[in-house]
Image (cartoon, coloured by chain):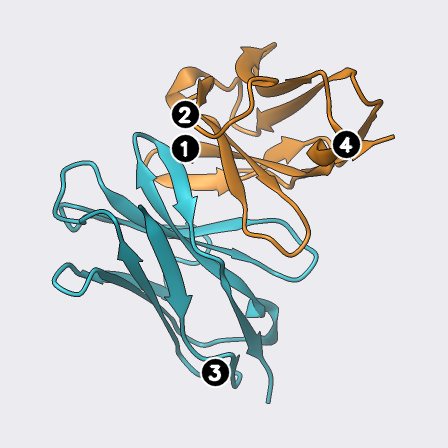
């Protein structure tokens, strides 16, 4: 069973920068896993932020960026805003199926 | 404008089969590259990807749930249906459908909460 691992929780100060990562139990994450990132706030449906590693949707704020870092997919928030406090999920592609990570709860404090 | 809406029973009994419908607008599943996926989220827990159907009627399932899931589409009605057999209380969750295009789950429905209880 493939497992996708994210940091359970992170804390960042307003205006700061934070990087969330997404690792695969099968080895290094590459562009072929088409990493996606989603933001979810309590009581809301997930909102797509990043797809195919680093591509942004039209609604994705400029302070969000995606990359590959040290064998993992990464989501970096630069100039964090209070409204960025949320749960963040990554999603990886495995030969026809997709697997979500366990989520990272980001606290802005 | 792309929209998706999930519908189905709010309550099912253990061992019953769940049938959920995703009704969408703003795109067609006859268009090359278009897909619809189902995702669920138990209360307070992480998202779990369940299944996907594409414009060519190819179907993909979660490895751990594939024996219980069936996904199908009715392009004339702009609907995708997911059935899950042998429901258990651990299947209590909010079930979402989402559009997949260009390797992105870009638009999501608001979700429907399904409780499994006798």
**Which SS class for mark 4?**
helix
Residue contact between numbered discs 1 and 4, judged by CB atoms under 8 Å: no
The residue beneath circle 4 is A82
Q: Chain of mark 1?
A: A
| Quadrant of the frame with the C terminus of chain B | bottom right
**Which label sits on residue A33?**
none
Shown in cyan, the chain is B
Residue contact between numbered discs 4 and 3, judged by CB atoms under 8 Å: no
Shown in orange, the chain is A
Alpha carbons under labels 2 and 1: distance apart: 6 Å
Q: Is residue B60 visible?
A: no
Residue contact between numbered discs 2 and 1, judged by CB atoms under 8 Å: yes
Q: Nearer the viewer, mark 4 or mark 2?
A: 4
Q: What x and y, as percent, mark residue A88?
A: 63, 36
- Residue most toward the top? A70
Q: Is residue A59 above or below residue B67?
A: above
Same subunit, labels 3 and 2: the answer reads no
Q: Is residue A41 visible?
A: yes
Q: What x and y, as percent, mark residue B30?
A: 12, 48
Q: Nearer the viewer, mark 3 or mark 2?
A: 2
Same subunit, labels 1 and 4: the answer reads yes
**Which label sits on residue A34?**
2
Label 2, residues with CA under 10 Å away: few <14, some 14-19, many ≥20:
many
**Which SS class for mark 3?**
loop
Q: Chain of mark 3?
A: B
Q: What x and y, as percent, mark residue A94?
A: 40, 33
Q: Is residue B49 above or below residue A68?
A: below
Same subunit, labels 4 and 2: the answer reads yes
Residue pictured at 17% horizontal, 65% vertical: B77
Residue B94 appears in which quarter of the rendering?
Answer: bottom right
The residue beneath circle 1 is A93
């Amino acid at each position: 069973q493939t497992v996708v691992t994210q940091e359970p929780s992170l804390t960042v100060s307003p205006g700061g920068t934070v990087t969330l990562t997404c690792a695969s139990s099968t080895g290094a994450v590459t562009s072929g896993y088409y990493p996606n990132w989603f933001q979810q706030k309590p009581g809301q449906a997930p909102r797509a932020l990043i797809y195919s590693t680093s591509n942004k949707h039209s609604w994705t704020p400029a302070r969000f960026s995606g990359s590959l870092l040290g064998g993992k997919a990464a989501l970096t928030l630069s100039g964090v805003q209070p409204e960025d406090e949320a749960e963040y999920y990554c999603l990886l592609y495995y030969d026809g199926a997709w697997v979500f990570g366990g989520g990272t709860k980001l606290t802005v404090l | 404008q792309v929209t998706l809406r999930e519908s189905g029973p709010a309550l099912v009994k253990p061992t019953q089969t769940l049938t959920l419908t995703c009704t969408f607008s703003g795109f067609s599943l006859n268009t090359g590259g278009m897909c619809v996926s189902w995702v669920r989220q138990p209360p307070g827990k992480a998202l779990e990807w369940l299944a996907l159907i594409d414009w060519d009627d190819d179907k993909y399932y979660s490895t751990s749930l594939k024996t219980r899931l069936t996904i199908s589409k009715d392009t004339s009605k702009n609907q995708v249906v997911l059935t899950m057999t042998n429901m258990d209380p651990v299947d209590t969750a909010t079930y979402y459908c989402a559009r997949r295009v260009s390797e992105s789950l870009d638009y999501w429905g608001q979700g429907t909460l399904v409780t499994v209880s006798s």
